[in-house]
Structure formats: C-alpha cells, structure tokens
Image (tube, helix red, strand yellow):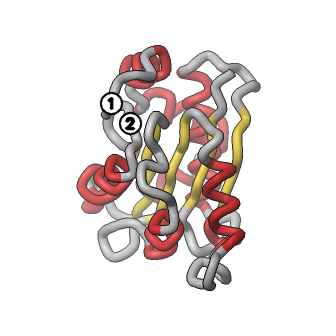
C-alpha cells in the first residue's frame, strides 16, 4: 500500500502551511485513488525546532527515519526571504545522502504574494532532487489568500493543480529517476 507522509518546515506549530500540506496530502490520495488509506507519517518541523541544532538531534533523526518509510512525501514550507525556511533546511541537512532516493516528492510552497510563485521550482525543488527525490510535475505554489477556503475546497483545488499523469506514472514505475 502506498503511504503518503508530510513534512512541514514552518517554525509555527500547526500553521496554515501545515493545514495546506494536509490538504495536498488528501489531494494526492485522491489522484492516486487511495481513498482514506495511504496514511503515513506527519512531521511538523516546529516540534523539532528546539532540538534541530542539538548534538545528536535524535528527535530529528527519528522523524527523518519515520518519513523515510513513506512512498510519497509532501514537503511544504512557507516562503521566507524568497525561498524556503531555515528550519526546513536545517532538518533536511540532517538527512543522510540519498534520503529521498526512490521517493516521490510533492513540493508545496506558500507565500503572501504571487511574485514568489517560482520559488518552489527555483529553490525547493532542487533541494529535494539533490536528496534523491523524484518530483512529479511542477511543485505546487499557493498564495496565502487561497488558504481562506474550506479544507475540502482547498483539497479539490489542489487536485486540479497536481500533474496526475506524472504522479501516477512515477507511482507505477518506481525505477524511474527524477
């Protein structure tokens, strides 16, 4: 069974980015026809912030190990200074080389202005590919104004934005490399 995990790099716990990432996970579930199955690990990096730079950072490593069990990962961040957050980068810096190898990754970036719409492709996607992730289609950009909709409306809108063909092709052909 395909598991979909979520990693959110917002320093605020249970942020709007967190809720958008959960809506995107549900959209991926719909596109892959998984119904209510497909639950995977959920990691809010805000819960790891106090330990992210601690020697050993066992909580961070445990979270990364748990996320590595998922087949598909939604990795989400708000836009900060025109790119992803330092917290997300600090967490991912602790991932072993090739941590995302064989994983399908759906990047999500949220910003207050459409002027940052390319940040998901210019900054977040290369980071995820460097870790070995296979990105299905384009990353998803959301303007904060879109977060005012209900979770169901947001999920439906995200289904329309996902590249269903690319996502299904990667799930059915795990040997493909991004």
* Chain-order first, disc 1 or disc 2: 2
Total marks drawn? 2
Tell me which residue sits at (63%, 48%) in the image. Answer: 67
Disc number lying in front (1 or 2) = 1
Between 97 and 123, the one lying in front of the other is 97
Q: Which residue is mark 2?
A: 134
Q: How far across and down, in percent of the image, does residue 140 sit?
A: 40, 44
Task: Find numbered disc 1 in the image and state the secondary structure of the residue it sits on.
Answer: loop
Is there CB contact under 8 Å for labels 1 and 2?
A: yes
Q: How far across and down, in percent of the image, does residue 144 sit?
A: 47, 59
Q: Residues within 10 Å of mark 2 (few under 14, many from 20)?
A: many
Is residue 71 placed above or below 81 in the rendered structure?
A: above
Q: Which residue is mark 1?
A: 177
Q: How far across and down, in percent of the image, does residue 93 sit?
A: 45, 68
The answer to which image quadrant residue 136 occupies is: top left
The answer to which image quadrant residue 12 occupies is: bottom right
Tell me which residue sits at (60%, 60%) in the image. Answer: 16
């Amino acid at each position: 069974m395909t598991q979909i995990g979520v990693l959110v790099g917002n320093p605020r716990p249970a942020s709007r980015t967190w809720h958008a990432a959960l809506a995107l996970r549900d959209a991926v579930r719909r596109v892959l026809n998984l119904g209510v199955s497909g639950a995977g690990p959920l990691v809010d990096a805000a819960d790891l912030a106090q330990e992210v730079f601690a020697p050993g950072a066992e909580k961070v490593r445990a979270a990364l190990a748990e996320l590595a069990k998922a087949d598909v990962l939604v990795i989400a961040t708000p836009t900060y200074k025109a790119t992803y957050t330092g917290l997300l980068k600090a967490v991912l810096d602790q991932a072993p080389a090739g941590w995302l190898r064989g994983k399908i990754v759906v990047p999500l970036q949220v910003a207050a202005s459409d002027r940052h719409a390319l940040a998901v492709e210019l900054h977040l996607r290369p980071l995820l590919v460097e870790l070995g992730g296979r990105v299905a289609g384009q990353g998803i950009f959301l303007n904060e104004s879109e977060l005012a909709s209900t979770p169901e409306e947001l999920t439906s809108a995200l289904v329309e934005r996902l590249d269903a063909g690319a996502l299904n092709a990667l799930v059915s052909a795990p040997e493909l490399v991004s």
